[in-house]
Structure formats: structure tokens, C-alpha cells
């Protein structure tokens, strides 16, 4: 099966295509992709993962053609950021 693994930081993003065996888990696909070597700060014990924007467990079976995404933790409250924006629109 062929899947993709995606991860992004504020400075860099990667998309890695990976061939995995039928029945492989999301965790196995992530490990095989090499993304954990490229981004050693990824902590699968803490960070959430998903496929096509929907949260999944690491032991879920990966599906052919899936895009597995590793999500970074939120470091600020979006409501606080919105309140700090000047009146009249988005911050540039």
C-alpha cells in the first residue's frame, strides 16, 4: 500500500510517500516514513495524528492512499490571539 505522511513546523513542511505492508498501523507508517528522524522533537506519545483531518489512534490500521498527518500542539489560545488583533480585520 502507498500512503503519505505530512508534518509541518513554522519553518518547514514535509510530505513523505511511503510503501507499507497491508495491515500496517498508523504508527508503523509514521516510523517507516523517516519523519521522526527528520524532526526528532515529534513526540507521538503527546501529539495527535489524523488522516485527512480526522483524528485517529496510532494503532489504527493505515489505509491505502491515506494522508497521515502529525499535528503540532497548540501553543497559544486562538481566542486570546483573536482578542489581541486590532479592530477591523486580520493581522498582517
Image (spheres, rainbow, N blue to C red):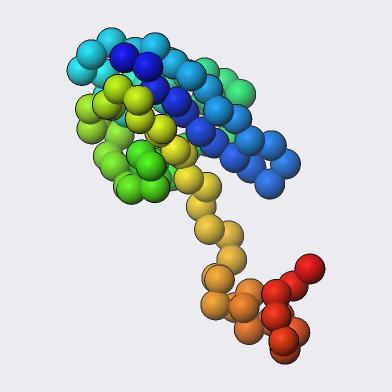
User: Which quadrant does the N terminus fall into?
Assistant: top left
Point 68% across, 46% down: residue: 10
Please state the horizontal and vertical placement of residue 7, each as a whole percent of the image.
54, 36
The quarter of the displayed image where residue 11 is located: top right
In the image, farthest residue toward the right = 92
Compare residues 27 and 53 and report the one nearer the observer.
Answer: 53
Image label count: 0
Point 55% across, 70% down: residue: 77
Please state the horizontal and vertical placement of residue 49, each as a whole percent of the image.
39, 41
Point 55% across, 71% down: residue: 78
Compare residues 88 and 27 and report the one nearer the observer.
Answer: 88
Point 32% across, 47% down: residue: 55
Would you say residue 27 is visible in this rendering?
A: no
Viewed as shown, does residue 12 lie left or right of 69?
right
The quarter of the displayed image where residue 41 is located: top right
In the image, farthest residue toward the bottom = 87
Would you say residue 37 is visible in this rendering?
A: yes
User: Which quadrant does the C terminus fall into?
Assistant: bottom right
Viewed as shown, does residue 72 lie left or right of 55?
right
Viewed as shown, does residue 26 lie left or right of 33?
left
Viewed as shown, does residue 1 lie left or right of 60?
right
Please state the horizontal and vertical placement of residue 28, each as a whole percent of the image.
34, 20
Query: Is residue 2 placed above or below 26 in the rendered structure?
Result: above
Please state the horizontal and vertical placement of residue 47, each as a whole percent of the image.
44, 44
Query: Is residue 79 placed above or below 1 in the rendered structure?
Result: below
Query: Is residue 84 placed above or below 49 in the rendered structure?
Result: below
Amino acid at each position: 500500500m502507498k500512503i503519505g505522511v505530512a508534518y509541518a513546523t513554522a519553518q518547514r513542511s514535509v510530505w513523505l510517500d511511503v510503501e507499507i505492508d497491508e495491515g500496517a498501523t498508523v504508527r508503523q507508517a509514521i516510523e517507516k516514513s523517516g519523519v521522526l528522524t527528520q524532526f526528532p522533537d515529534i513526540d507521538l506519545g503527546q501529539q495527535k495524528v489524523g488522516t485527512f483531518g480526522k483524528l485517529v489512534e496510532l494503532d489504527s490500521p493505515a489505509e491505502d492512499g491515506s494522508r497521515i498527518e502529525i499535528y503540532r500542539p497548540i501553543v497559544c489560545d486562538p481566542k486570546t490571539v483573536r482578542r489581541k488583533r486590532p479592530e477591523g480585520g486580520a493581522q498582517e
